[in-house]
Image (tube, rainbow, N blue to C red):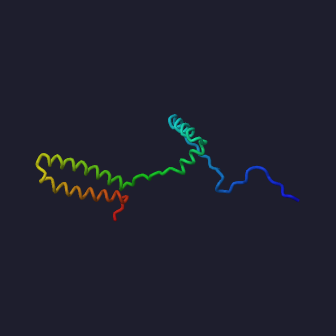
Amino acid sequence: MEKKKSGGRPIKKLGEKKKYLITVKLDTGEYISLKTKVKMAGICRSEFIRQCLLGSVILPRLTPELNDYIRKLSGMGNNLNQIARKANAEGYSNARNECLLLLKQIDKIIGLIENDGKNS
């Protein structure tokens, strides 16, 4: 006796089956943007969103330490401007030491930022 073929698509494996439904609310601009991009890509909305998820890179938020370093750099930039004004008014030789000290501090803070806030 011959084995009868069952019709239809083969059964998907457990990891291949799409069983999660996610609802997202969009404003009018976001919705029109999505529709336009889907039409330009020539694929269905679901597939477009899947491809966006797989191809996107989301950077993590800055840590409180990095935010603090950035605030310090901003303050040091203000100090550098004040030193420059002082140098223009009083002469550059008087402001040299202050400037060198501040530059060392700026280099240290930039090094910390480059290392993601970790002292090394």
Residue 21 higher or lower than 109, as above or below: above
User: In the rendered view of the protein, which quadrant contains the C terminus?
Assistant: bottom left
Q: Find residue 114 and report its image quarter.
A: bottom left
Residue 41 higher or lower than 61, as above or below: above
User: In the rendered view of the protein, which quadrant contains the N terminus?
Assistant: bottom right
The residue sitting at the bottom extreme is: 120
**Percent x, y of residue 77:** 25, 49
**Percent x, y of residue 54:** 54, 51
Q: Is residue 108 left or right of residue 33?
A: left
**Percent x, y of residue 15:** 64, 56
Q: Residue at x 18, y 50 (%)?
A: 83
Q: Which is more toward the observer, 35 or 30?
A: 35
Q: Residue at x 24, y 48 (%)?
A: 78
Q: Which is more toward the observer, 36 or 77?
A: 36
Q: Is residue 114 left or right of residue 1?
A: left
**Percent x, y of residue 85:** 17, 46
The residue sitting at the right extreme is: 1
Q: Find residue 97 and report its image quarter.
A: bottom left
Residue 100 higher or lower than 50, as above or below: below
